[in-house]
Image (cartoon, rainbow, N blue to C red):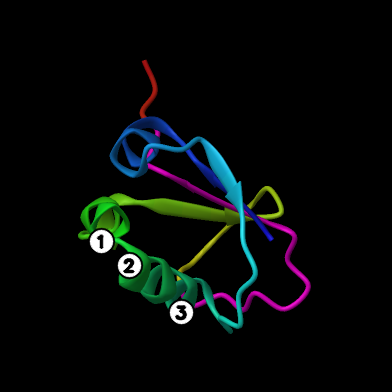
Amino acid sequence: MDILYFAWVRERIGLPRETIQTEAATVADLVAELCAREDRYAVAFADITALRVALDQELTDFDAPLAGVREVAFFPPMTGG
């Protein structure tokens, strides 16, 4: 599964993207798995209410299932101007 990180999420993790193998059932499970890997993930995901997630380029919630998903993207909310 490809994981993409944008804006300050990318800065805190130090990667724009990575490919991982996971047994996570939901986005929340994936976040917990990543946070257990290294502190930089725990810092980036410390407040998931400040994040949005997209599965295969469709906005969704952190309780969304990951079955069949090829790409997960994490990013802060966007503002218009």
- Few, some or many residues within 10 Å of mark 3 (<14, 14–19, 20+): some
The residue to which callout 2 is attached is 35
Alpha-carbon span between mark 3 and mark 1 = 13 Å
Q: Which residues are magenta?
A: 63-78
Label 2 SS: helix
Specify the quadrant of the image occupied by residue 59.
bottom right
Specify the quadrant of the image occupied by residue 45.
bottom left
Residue at (45, 35) in percent of width and height = 6
| Residue in the foreground of this view, choosing between 66 and 20 | 20
The residue to which callout 3 is attached is 29
| Residue in the foreground of this view, choosing between 47 and 19 | 19
Specify the quadrant of the image occupied by residue 13.
top left
Alpha-carbon span between mark 3 and mark 2 = 10 Å
The residue to which callout 1 is attached is 42
Label 1 SS: helix
Label 2 sits on what residue type?
Cys
> Which quarter of the rendering shows the C terminus?
top left
Percent from the top left, x then y, of residue 24? 56, 81
Q: Check the image and report above or below for 25 versus 39.
A: below
Q: Are marks 2 and 1 in contact (CB under 8 Å)?
A: yes
